[in-house]
C-alpha cells in the first residue's frame, strides 16, 4: 500500500541542510512521524516565474542553475547525477532551458531544498511530471514537505508515486497560509527502490501571497 512507502527513511532535513563534505547524504537512523493530513489543493492557475509576483523561492524556475537550492543524492559512481540541469544535458524542463529531475536510478534518494519565509495568504505551486519503469506499484515516490531548520517535520504538502499518470505535466497548487511568517525548509524528496526506477521532473516553483494579485 502507499502508506507503507511513507514509512521509508524520512529524517531528511539533516541530509538536506547538513550534508557531508562530499555532498553525499547519510540515511537517517530513525523515522520521522508522519502527517497524513489531506492536502489542501487550491484551484489550478498556470503561472510561470515571470508572472509569480514576489516569489519567496529563489530561482524557482531553475534558470540560474543551483542558485538558491541545496541538492543531495545517494547516487554514487555511475548513479551519481545532478538534480538541476539543462535540456542539452538531457533534462526535460516544463519551461525555459533549466529544470530539476529527481530519481532516475534504482536505489537512490534525492533531495532538493531551500529555506523560505512563508508569506501571508501563501500559495505554493509547481509543475511536475513522472516517468516510471517500476512494475511493483507505489515503490518509488516524490514528497513535498515543510520542515523546521533543526529537522522537525511540519507537514507533508504533497505525495506522488510511480502510479501517477505518466509523461504529463501537472501543476500542484497548495494553500500554505497556515504557516505565514515562519522560516521553514521547503523540501522536494524522491526515493527509488532497488528494482526499476522512476524519474520525477520539477519546474516553476512559486511561493507567493495571493493578495499580490
Image: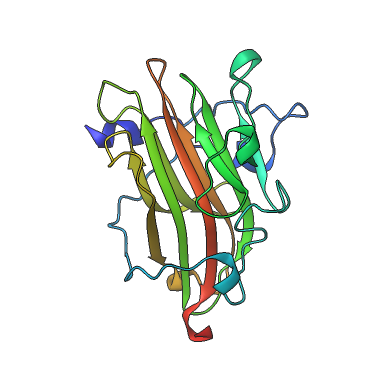
Q: Which residue lies furthest to the right in this view?
A: 21
Tally the marks.
Answer: 0
Residue 195 coordinates in the image, percent (x, y): 37, 15
The percent coordinates of residue 190 (x first, y second) are: 47, 36
The residue lying toward the viewer, choosing from 199 and 40, is 199
Asked whether 156 or 208 is in front, the reply is 208
Is residue 151 found left or right of 153 in the rendered image? right
Q: Which residue is nearer to you in this view: 28 or 157?
A: 157
**What residue is rendered at 28% in x and 31% in y?**
138
Q: Is residue 18 above or below residue 43?
A: above
The image quadrant that residue 25 belongs to is: top right
Q: Is residue 141 left or right of residue 59?
A: left
Q: Is residue 46 above or below residue 83?
A: below
Can residue 3 be seen at all in this image of the molecule? yes
Residue found farthest to the left: 1
Q: In the image, residue 101 lies at what x, y percent?
A: 53, 38
At 56% from the left edge and 69% from the top edge, which residue is drawn? Answer: 118
Amino acid at each position: 500500500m502507499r502508506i507503507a512507502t511513507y514509512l521509508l527513511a524520512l529524517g531528511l532535513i539533516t541530509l538536506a541542510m547538513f550534508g557531508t563534505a562530499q555532498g553525499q547524504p547519510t540515511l537517517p537512523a530513525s523515522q520521522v512521524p508522519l502527517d497524513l493530513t489531506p492536502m489542501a489543493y487550491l484551484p489550478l492557475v498556470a503561472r510561470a516565474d515571470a508572472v509569480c509576483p514576489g516569489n519567496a523561492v529563489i530561482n524557482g524556475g531553475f534558470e540560474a542553475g543551483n542558485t538558491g537550492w541545496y541538492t543531495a543524492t545517494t547516487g554514487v559512481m555511475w548513479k551519481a547525477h545532478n538534480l538541476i540541469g539543462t535540456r542539452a544535458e538531457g533534462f526535460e524542463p516544463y519551461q525555459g532551458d533549466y529544470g530539476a529531475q529527481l530519481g532516475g536510478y534504482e536505489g537512490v534518494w534525492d533531495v532538493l531544498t531551500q529555506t523560505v519565509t512563508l508569506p501571508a495568504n501563501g500559495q505554493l505551486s509547481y509543475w511536475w511530471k513522472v516517468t516510471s519503469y517500476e512494475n511493483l506499484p507505489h515503490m518509488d515516490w516524490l514528497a513535498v514537505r515543510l520542515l523546521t531548520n533543526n529537522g522537525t517535520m511540519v507537514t507533508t504538502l504533497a505525495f506522488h508515486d510511480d502510479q501517477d499518470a505518466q509523461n504529463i505535466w501537472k501543476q500542484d497548487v497548495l494553500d500554505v497560509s497556515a504557516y505565514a511568517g515562519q522560516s521553514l525548509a521547503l523540501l522536494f524528496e524522491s526515493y527509488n527502490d532497488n528494482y526499476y526506477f522512476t524519474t520525477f521532473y520539477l519546474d516553476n516553483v512559486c511561493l507567493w501571497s495571493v493578495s499580490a494579485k
